[in-house]
């Protein structure tokens, strides 16, 4: 299986643009860090993949955060993706497992739930940010993110995300985003529909050993694609650190901090995004309190 990565391409006639990603390794990292159930792996894996796909389209220099807040037993699913090719995320109830759905697939839709919202916050990299909210369509992640894209760009798009898991772990994960551009015609849509009808399952193609380039060509036969960039590597990466956790203590009330010190407690924090645990010993806390 090739390394995780991303390719962007555009049709030379200006009819469509596409982003394709492979995320197998980073979804496995997320599974291990958060000790995810099968259902939670599929949900978070699809969300991480969708964030990686959407990020270069809506936040080319900044970053994007997506929060799926449905009424399902998995609770919130939160993911971030940066323009540097890093993603991170978590599931509120990572151990929830559900029976397969009627199609024999992991039941992400029930896990996330439908009655709720997807909040997408885009930071443009120049300090400004804004949040859009759409209602969840199915809780299956792909459709929900596509609704956001269509709303946000007022243009048709297709978003496919998939995660395949076996007893050994994540065997394949990835996705494809195709967006219509202003110069598209009826023929463009027809061609896309025909291609997708015979496309098959994204993760099945990956497991057959197809590389991203080949999958892209298969999905977009008949288009004259031009790659916009070299293949960009993708990884699960959280920028939290001990230092940042110490900084966060500095914004606590002095009384609260003093109370912890008096009780002889050391400060303990866990990063939601990567599960790293940070401990701050009493003497460091004393120093922080004194400087307040
Ligand atoms: Zn972290």
Image: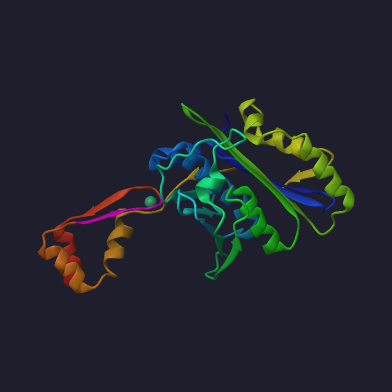
Toward the viewer: 152 or 114?
Answer: 114
User: Is residue 286 in view?
Assistant: no
Please tell me whether residue 134 is drawn above or below residue 143 in the rendered image: below
Q: Position of residue 79 (x, y in %)?
A: 50, 53
Total numbered labels: 0
Residue 173 located left or right of residue 227: left
Q: Position of residue 25 (x, y in %)?
A: 50, 36
The span picked out in magenta is 267-273
Tell me which residue sits at (27%, 68%) in the image. Answer: 250
* Quarter of the figure that contains the C terminus: bottom left
Please tell me whether residue 65 is drawn above or below residue 126 in the rendered image: above
Q: Position of residue 137 (x, y in %)?
A: 63, 54
Toward the viewer: 3 or 29?
Answer: 29
Toward the viewer: 60 or 162?
Answer: 162
Tell me which residue sits at (77%, 34%) in the image. Answer: 198
Q: Position of residue 175 (x, y in %)?
A: 63, 42
Query: What colouring method underlies this structural image?
Result: rainbow
Residue 284 located left or right of residue 30: left
Please tell me whether residue 276 is drawn above or below residue 214 in the rendered image: below
Check residue 130 for magenta coloring.
Answer: no
Tell me which residue sits at (47%, 42%) in the image. Answer: 40
Q: Quadrant of residue 291?
A: bottom left
Check residue 268 for magenta coloring.
Answer: yes
Tell me which residue sits at (30%, 64%) in the image. Answer: 247
- Outermost residue, front direction? 102
* Quarter of the figure that contains the N terminus: top right
User: Is residue 173 in view?
Assistant: yes
């Amino acid at each position: 299986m090739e390394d995780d990565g991303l390719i962007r391409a555009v049709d030379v006639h200006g009819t469509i643009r596409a982003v394709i990603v492979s995320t197998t390794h980073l979804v496995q990292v997320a599974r291990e860090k958060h000790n995810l159930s099968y259902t939670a792996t599929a949900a978070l894996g699809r969300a991480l993949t969708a964030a990686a796909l959407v990020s270069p389209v809506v936040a080319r220099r900044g970053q994007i955060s997506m929060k799926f807040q449905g009424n399902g037993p998995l609770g919130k699913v939160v993911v971030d993706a940066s323009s540097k090719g890093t993603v991170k995320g978590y599931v509120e109830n990572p151990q929830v497992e559900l029976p397969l759905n009627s199609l024999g697939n992991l039941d992400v839709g029930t896990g996330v739930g439908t009655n709720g919202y997807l909040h997408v916050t885009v930071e443009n990299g120049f300090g400004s940010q804004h949040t859009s909210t759409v209602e969840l369509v199915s809780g299956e992640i792909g459709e929900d993110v596509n609704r956001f894209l269509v709303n946000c760009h007022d243009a048709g798009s297709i978003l496919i995300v998939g995660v395949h898991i076996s007893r050994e772990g994540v065997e394949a994960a990835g996705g494809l985003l195709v967006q219509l551009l202003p110069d598209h015609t009826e023929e463009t849509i027809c061609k896309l529909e025909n291609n997708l009808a015979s496309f098959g399952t994204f993760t099945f193609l990956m497991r057959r050993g197809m590389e991203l380039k080949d999958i892209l060509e298969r999905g977009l036969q008949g288009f004259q694609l031009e790659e916009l960039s070299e293949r960009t590597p993708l990884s699960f990466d959280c920028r939290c650190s001990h230092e940042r956790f110490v900084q966060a203590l500095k914004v606590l009330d002095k009384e609260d901090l003093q109370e912890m010190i008096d009780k002889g407690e050391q400060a303990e924090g866990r990063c939601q995004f990567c599960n790293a645990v940070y401990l701050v010993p009493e003497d460091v806390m004393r120093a922080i309190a004194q400087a307040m």
